[in-house]
């Protein structure tokens, strides 16, 4: 029985190794005001299946809507998730979001609705890649409309402290379950053989 428990514990920890992981990309301090851009934010690519859990939206204090949408061609597809930002919140923290990101898909995370509300900072994406292993931030997005997104590889828009959580792959749970069932069957077979 002791061997069964020890082997089960090892299988448990091997399955545990593939559990969810939380990462945060802090981003730069956003001190400059965005002017006359209806949509501004970031172009993000999901490297693994993950979920966007939280971010801080730096703005000039007006009301806005933050949207997450997948990039399709030169524009965006339907809005996948959104959250309203009330006025008088120049540092708005959105948390407990659980916005799903599919591996290999590019998204825009943008503030939209108020053309003079967002913040940005100069940022060189080519020489300072921003990635946490789950997502990569490709460029800033500054655009009058989202039919044809205008990306900017020299400016970081609107968001910092972007937190993602990896989605555990079924491959981590299945070996654990198979090992546990197999060990249980092996232990039963041993008991029957001994009696």
Image (tube, rainbow, N blue to C red):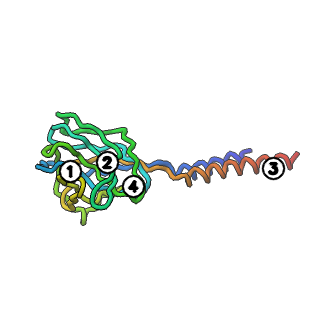
Task: Tell me if residue 32 can be seen.
Answer: no
**Toward the viewer: 64 or 145?**
145
Mark 3 and mark 1 in contact? Answer it, CB < 8 Å: no
- Of mark 1 and mark 4, the one earlier in the sequence is 1
Residue 177 appears left or right of 37: right
- Of mark 3 and mark 2, the one earlier in the sequence is 2
Query: Residue tagged by mark 4?
Result: 134
Where residue 71 appears, x then y in whole percent?
A: 32, 56
Q: Say which element carries label 3.
A: helix
- Distance from disc 3 to disc 2, alpha carbons, whole Å, reads 55 Å
Query: Residue tagged by mark 1?
Result: 40
Above or below, 86 against 23 in this view is above
Q: Say which element carries label 4.
A: loop
Q: Say which element carries label 1.
A: strand
Task: Tell me if residue 110 can be seen.
Answer: yes
Mark 1 and mark 2 in contact? Answer it, CB < 8 Å: no
Q: Quadrant of the N terminus?
A: top right
- In the picture, the disc for residue 190 is 3
- Of mark 4 and mark 2, the one earlier in the sequence is 2
- Of mark 4 and mark 3, the one earlier in the sequence is 4
Mark 4 and mark 3 in contact? Answer it, CB < 8 Å: no
Where residue 80 appears, x then y in whole percent?
A: 35, 46
Tag in front: 4 or 2: 2
Q: Callout 4 environment at 10 Å: few (<14), some (14 to 19), or many (20+)?
A: many
Examine the image and state in which quarter residue 95 appears.
Answer: top left
- Distance from disc 3 to disc 1, alpha carbons, whole Å, reads 65 Å
Query: Residue tagged by mark 2?
Result: 68
């Amino acid at each position: 029985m002791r061997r069964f428990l020890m082997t089960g514990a090892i299988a448990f920890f091997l399955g545990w190794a593939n559990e969810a992981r939380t990462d945060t990309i802090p981003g730069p301090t956003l001190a400059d005001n965005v002017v006359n851009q209806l949509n501004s934010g970031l172009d993000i690519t999901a490297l693994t299946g993950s979920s966007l859990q939280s971010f801080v939206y730096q703005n000039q204090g007006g009301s806005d809507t933050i949207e997450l949408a997948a990039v399709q061609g030169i524009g965006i597809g339907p809005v996948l998730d959104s959250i309203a930002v009330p006025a008088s919140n120049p540092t708005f923290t959105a948390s407990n979001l659980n916005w799903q990101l599919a591996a290999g898909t590019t998204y825009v995370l943008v503030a939209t609705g108020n053309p003079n509300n967002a913040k940005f900072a100069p940022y060189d994406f080519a020489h300072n890649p921003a990635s946490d292993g789950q997502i990569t931030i490709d460029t800033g997005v500054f655009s009058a409309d989202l039919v044809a997104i205008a990306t900017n590889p020299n400016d970081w828009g609107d968001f910092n402290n972007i937190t993602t959580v990896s989605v555990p792959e079924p491959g981590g749970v299945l070996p654990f379950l198979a090992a546990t069932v197999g060990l249980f069957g092996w232990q039963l077979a041993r008991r029957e053989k001994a009696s």
